[in-house]
Amino acid sequence: MRVTPKRKSALYVIASVMMASLLIFTAGCGNTSQGKIVEGKVNVVTSFYPLYYMASEIGGDEVNVMNLIPTGVEPHDWTPKSLDLQNASKAQVLIYQGSGFEGWIDDFKKGLDSNSQVKLVEASTGISLIASEESEADHDHDHDGDAHDEAAEDHDHAAEEAHDHAHDHGGVDPHTWVSPKSALIMAKNVKQALVDADPAHESLYEERYQALHEKLEALDQQYMDQLADLSHREIVVSHQAFGYLARDYQLAQHSIMGLSPEAEPTAQELVRLSKLVKEQGLKYIFFEELVTDQLASTLANEADVETLVLNPLEGLTEQQEQAGDNYISLMERNLENLVKALK
């Protein structure tokens, strides 16, 4: 495809307008964390939805799980408040993703009460991490994540500093949970954290963990079986969140934006992806639900293809929560859409 100056200028304008719309869209989301300390239970704070799901499934009635990021909020847009520090300081366990996902975590730790007994657990421990420049071979633009560098007035100093680093992934792709194979490791880490905090109920945690482990193993097998013999292996996604999924199930990821969904694409990248879609004979471009789909739709229109949802599972929408969706059901839906797009 020949890119004329006029066409390139138009694509720059489109990209800029779409990113401005994204900022407006996400800025309107709430920022109130969920849950409060419950006496007589093991209080566990999780940093985002997949960890909340795992801790709730394994913890059962013995555990009170509080998720820092509210329903409907994209984690890259969220920063901790003073109440979050208070709850975490009083909890027995704080489980966070690690691998650079929570850019605010170091300052959050410093802001905890000096007498806090909370144990911090990094859920991605034990996973072979992908270097960010390797998670997508042909995606080489930098992103410093300053798009949302603003703090609410009621944030304390630690939270404000944390937001400045909210998009710093530390040179690795943090999105491990999007692969069932990685989720199996994360669930084991969550289970061990609960056992360490409450050894009296170890047998209950082990029993529930085994039930979750079986679900995740079955999910992994579904992915291996259904993705094995598809005619296409290339996926074009709005946000570079599927590197582990691609690695573990032999797919190739190409993203419109970077590791953060606010990383703005260049006009050249949009043209390159449009060319890739046409050359590979792809039928769909994937977008996600917690951010606007306008860039994906624009590229789909340019390449004359359709769009489908591929959920990075960073959080639930309000509709998904009300419908009773969870990690397993959404990952099964992802698989359905992958099969539809790649067959």
Image (cartoon, rainbow, N blue to C red):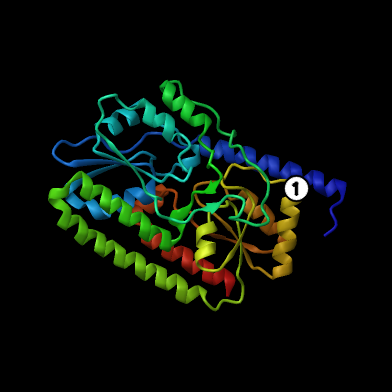
Residue at 45%, 40% in the rendered image: 102
* Mark 1 crowd level (few <14, some 14–19, many ≥20, 10 Å Cα): some
* Above or below for 304 versus 143: below
- Which of these two is toward me, 258 or 169? 169
Q: Image check: 8 left or right of 119? A: right
Q: Quadrant of the C terminus?
A: bottom right
- Which of these two is toward me, 79 or 132? 132
Residue at 40%, 72% in the rendered image: 221
Q: What element carries label 1?
A: helix
Q: Image check: 81 left or right of 287? A: left
User: Residue 136 appears at what percent x and percent y?
Assistant: 62, 56
Which amino acid does the dot numbered 1 rest on? Ala
Q: Quadrant of the N terminus?
A: bottom right
User: Residue 13 appears at what percent x and percent y?
Assistant: 74, 41
User: Residue 324 appears at what percent x and percent y?
Assistant: 33, 56
* Above or below for 39 versus 188: above
Q: Quadrant of residue 307?
A: bottom right
Q: Quadrant of residue 153?
A: top left
User: Residue 119 appears at what percent x and percent y?
Assistant: 28, 38
Residue at 28%, 50% in the rendered image: 55
Residue 153 in view: yes
- Which of these two is toward me, 49 or 114? 114
* Above or below for 292 versus 275: above
